[in-house]
Image (tube, grey):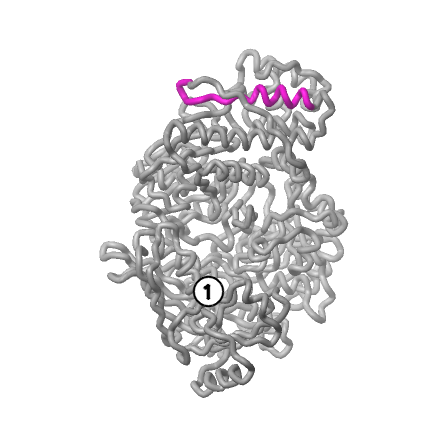
């Protein structure tokens, strides 16, 4: 679509064979919407064509004479061709109590707009300020992308005087509700600042901390609210007279931009190399680039913590970083110098490009090109079909790669969290010098403190829709709309991919990603994140919610800090299903068929659940079906060694442990004897219905992965085989008679069929594809059966197994073919990173 920009001439390459010049002449045409320019019309336009735009809509085409006249009229009116604007929108219809205010906040923040949103007797009133194009895009989204339960009947628009500022406020919807001033996430460097960064005539040329009202640090520098410079870590940097003048000038792009600074008054760069004198400013940048070129590992201080960086094309450097971090084969993220470099490594569609180049700049998981192996080291992401790629999102990143006149740095950098595996990201400068000493050869740092540690977010795109994998920088602390009112609540999630969530009224706020609660440092980081979230939101929880697992550290943390407040527990998979229901605005008036597949979740019967089909709403759930139990021997040992789960499934299927099978051969004879004794006697075993463990077992059966270095490694590599496979028939699970806890579907026939195929010489790729197809067919069959017995037609897919793109696509297509409504996570991860949101909803709904 082509959108007009009020008072501005824009030359924009739209991919239709030429540049389109768009002119908006507000006030010179009657207020009618003749229609946006459709794709078919765009194809007819050529370079140099002019169209007249009014309120973001195409009114008519004009010739060059008409364009000149329109421009002259604008200049006579005294309107600059490129200016910051402020606009009020009044939205009418069903727009209260449906999550419209947080939708506006999230959208405005994404577009770099500031202002407020509130309800009044007539609807929702929005006042926003920012770039004209962003205001027009907000206008379009208000009409076309409102929350699912909203019905927009009309939108009134009014131009206002510019006020400036960088905050956003959600006003009260009724007298009893407190208005809230909300903190923005950190925002990637905008195009205007990037142009100034590389312009030798600009006063901020090469300034590593250039920012404006449209970009830069927000969440990670806030110490308290209301959001003002004195309440950020920029408070100690007194503005120079020139910056102060910009800050106070309403027409300036830096009007009330709290992080504003320049080379004279802003933060300073410093490069520390053991045994050498420290370097500052340009010399620090020069030294860091040289160190990276030479194969060194440099700890680079970013927005939310330190990265460990090295040249991604230098296999020796990457392998050394992997050894120092004790990371095993867990993939590293890669930062590419620009989009063109990224496109050499991975395939990128339009949706993925939008994420890579947008304001949030997450790590995007993308299918790697064959040629990538020649451009980056083998140790970057061994055995993985995807690469996690991001683009520079701070001016320091841009300068680290080098701009015109610089001796260039590497074109691709490994950018991994500055920590040892399992620990929280390092954000304190003194801490970085000690904790990262065994890992880094040099430190490129600055003197702007980080108030809140915040890791990079990770996302992927499935069928054109964003799917969060890790929600952190660029997303936290954006609120999620709740489908009903909740009391002030704190939910603490689970032990893996830990996040917490505070909620009150119709809003919930999830923390940034904290990590796995395996050590004291992570537990302490979790507590700090929770306290900061309470500070930013003003929520004072009067109840806590935790996972029902009695051994989870997160649950113990909640009980230890309850202070007499009630602590409610929620079953793991019920919370997974509820999180997706809540994300899609379901009010709980009708249950759903919830399919929750993951690795571990504590069941009420004491078993390890993970292959569940539930009939659920917020108030409760029933277990409609589950994977037949097999013994999980030795707990985490069998998670780390998939061959043990393969042997357990073989035993359950009645198949001898033949050493010609890869999984049997992988298990040392002495361990095999002990494992056989455990399975025979039940010693040290717990029953599990985990689909995640079944994927592990099959990965070992076909010889893909017998021992893992990180969570889901075996399943990821098994999925990688299927990416190149053609259509196949799936293996069939056996559906048993109803039991006390619902139907039982047995994997034993699948295991027997896999073994038969392997002994017949069937390729591992085909076996993996047949297994994926069989699981997808199983979900379809269970959903259809559940619909027949309950009359329900909405299916929720949740749990970490549905991060598998091959499986998710096939399941969703199969369910759609059956005429069912399918809800999948998007804003929140399907893994445990979104669990706390579901816990809030179950606690309130019950």
**Numbered marks: total:** 1
Magenta span covers which residues? 739-757
Q: Which residue is mark 1?
A: 137
Name the foreground residue: 517 vs 721. 721
Instruction: Evaluate whether residue 482 shows in this view.
Output: yes
Looking at the image, residue 489 sits to the left or right of residue 375; the answer is left
Name the foreground residue: 630 vs 234. 630
Name the foreground residue: 575 vs 256. 575
Examine the structure image and report whether residue 329 is included in the region drawn in magenta.
no
Residue 178, horizontal then vertical, whole percent: 28, 56
- Residue 668, quarter of picture: top right
Instruction: Evaluate whether residue 224 shows in this view.
Output: no
Residue at left offset 56%, top offset 48%: 461
In the image, residue 279 sits, relative to residue 814, either above or below, namely below
Residue 727, horizontal then vertical, whole percent: 64, 35
Residue at left offset 45%, top offset 17%: 737
Residue at left offset 52%, top offset 81%: 67
Q: Residues within 10 Å of mark 1 (few under 14, many from 20)?
A: some
Examine the structure image and report whether residue 748 is included in the region drawn in magenta.
yes
Looking at the image, residue 572 sits to the left or right of residue 638; the answer is left
Looking at the image, residue 59 sits to the left or right of residue 776; the answer is left
Name the element at disc 1: helix
What is the quadrant of the C terminus in the image?
top left
Residue 467, horizontal then vertical, whole percent: 52, 46
């Amino acid at each position: 679509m082509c959108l007009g920009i009020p008072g501005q001439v824009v030359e924009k390459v739209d991919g239709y064979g030429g540049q389109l010049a768009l002119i908006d002449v507000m006030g010179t045409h009657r207020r009618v919407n003749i229609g946006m320019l459709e794709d078919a019309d765009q194809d007819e336009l050529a370079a140099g064509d002019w169209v007249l735009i009014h309120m973001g809509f195409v009114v008519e085409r004009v010739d060059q004479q008409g364009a000149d006249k329109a421009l002259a009229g604008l200049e006579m009116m005294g309107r600059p061709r490129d200016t910051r604007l402020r606009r009020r929108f009044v939205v009418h219809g069903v727009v209260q109590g449906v999550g419209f205010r947080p939708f506006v906040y999230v959208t405005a923040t994404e577009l770099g707009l500031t202002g407020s949103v509130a309800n009044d007797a007539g609807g929702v009133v929005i006042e926003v300020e920012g770039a004209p194009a962003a205001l027009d895009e907000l206008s379009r989204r208000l009409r076309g992308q409102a929350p699912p339960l909203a019905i927009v009947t009309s939108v009134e628009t009014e131009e206002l005087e510019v006020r400036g500022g960088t905050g956003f406020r959600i006003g009260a919807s009724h007298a009893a509700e407190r208005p809230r001033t909300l903190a923005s996430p950190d925002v990637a460097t905008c195009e205007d600042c990037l142009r100034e960064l590389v312009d030798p005539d600009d006063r901020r040329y090469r300034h590593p901390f250039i920012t404006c009202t449209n970009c830069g640090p927000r969440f990670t520098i806030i110490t308290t609210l209301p959001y003002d410079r004195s309440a950020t870590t920029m408070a100690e940097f007194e503005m120079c007279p020139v910056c102060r003048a910009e800050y106070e000038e309403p027409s300036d792009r830096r009007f009330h931009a709290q992080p504003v600074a320049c080379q004279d008054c802003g933060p300073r760069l410093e490069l520390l190399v053991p045994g050498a004198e420290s370097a500052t400013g340009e010399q620090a940048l020069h030294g860091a680039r040289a160190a990276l070129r030479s194969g060194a590992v440099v700890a680079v201080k970013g927005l939310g913590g330190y990265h460990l960086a090295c040249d991604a094309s230098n296999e020796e450097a990457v392998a050394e970083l992997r050894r120092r971090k004790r990371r095993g084969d867990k993939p590293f993220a890669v930062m590419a110098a620009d989009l063109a470099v990224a496109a050499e490594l991975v395939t990128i569609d339009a949706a993925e490009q939008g994420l890579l180049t947008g304001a949030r700049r997450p790590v995007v998981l993308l299918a790697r090109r064959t040629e990538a192996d020649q451009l980056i080291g083998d140790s970057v992401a061994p055995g993985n079909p995807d690469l996690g790629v991001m683009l520079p999102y701070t001016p320091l990143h841009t300068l680290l790669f080098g701009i015109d006149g610089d001796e260039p740095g590497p074109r691709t950098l490994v950018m991994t969290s500055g920590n040892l595996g399992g620990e929280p990201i390092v954000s304190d400068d003194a801490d970085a010098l000690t904790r990262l000493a065994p890992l880094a050869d040099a430190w490129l740092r600055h003197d702007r403190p980080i108030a809140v540690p915040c890791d990079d977010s990770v996302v992927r795109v499935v069928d054109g829709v964003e799917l969060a994998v890790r929600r952190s920088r660029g997303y936290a602390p954006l609120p999620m709309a709740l489908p009903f009112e909740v009391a002030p609540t704190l939910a603490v999630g689970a032990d893996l991919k830990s996040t917490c969530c505070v909620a009150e009224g119709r809003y919930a706020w999830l923390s940034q990603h904290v990590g796995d609660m395996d050590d004291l440092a992570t537990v302490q980081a979790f507590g700090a994140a929770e306290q900061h979230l309470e500070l930013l939101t003003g929520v004072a929880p009067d109840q806590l919610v935790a996972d029902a697992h009695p051994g989870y550290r997160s649950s113990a943390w909640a009980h230890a800090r309850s202070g007499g407040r009630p602590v409610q527990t929620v079953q793991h998979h019920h919370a997974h299903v509820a999180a997706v229901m809540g994300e899609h605005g379901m009010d709980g008036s009708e249950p759903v068929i919830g399919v929750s597949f993951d690795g571990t979740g504590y069941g009420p019967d004491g078993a390890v659940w993970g292959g569940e089909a539930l009939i659920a709403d917020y108030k409760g759930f029933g277990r409609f079906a589950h994977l037949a139990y097999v013994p999980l021997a030795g707990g985490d040992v069998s998670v780390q060694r998939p061959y043990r789960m393969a042997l357990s499934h073989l035993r359950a299927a009645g198949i001898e442990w033949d050493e010609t099978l890869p999984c049997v051969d992988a298990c040392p004879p002495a361990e095999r004897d002990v494992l056989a004794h455990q399975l025979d006697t039940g010693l040290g075993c717990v029953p599990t219905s985990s689909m995640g463990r079944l994927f592990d077992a099959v990965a070992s059966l076909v010889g893909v992965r017998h021992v893992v270095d990180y969570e889901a490694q075996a399943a990821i590599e098994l999925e990688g085989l299927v990416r190149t496979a053609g259509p196949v028939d799936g293996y069939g699970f056996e559906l048993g008679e109803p039991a006390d806890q619902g139907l039982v579907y047995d994997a034993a026939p699948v295991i027997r069929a896999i073994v038969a195929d392997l002994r017949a010489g069937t390729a591992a790729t085909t076996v993996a594809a047949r297994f994926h197809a069989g699981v997808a067919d199983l979900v379809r069959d269970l959903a259809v059966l559940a619909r027949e017995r309950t009359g329900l037609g909405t299916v929720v897919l949740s749990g970490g197994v549905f991060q598998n793109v091959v499986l998710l696509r096939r399941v969703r297509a199969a369910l759609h073919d059956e005429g069912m409504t399918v809800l999948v996570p998007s804003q929140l991860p399907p893994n445990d990173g979104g669990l706390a949101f579901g816990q809030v909803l179950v606690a309130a709904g019950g």
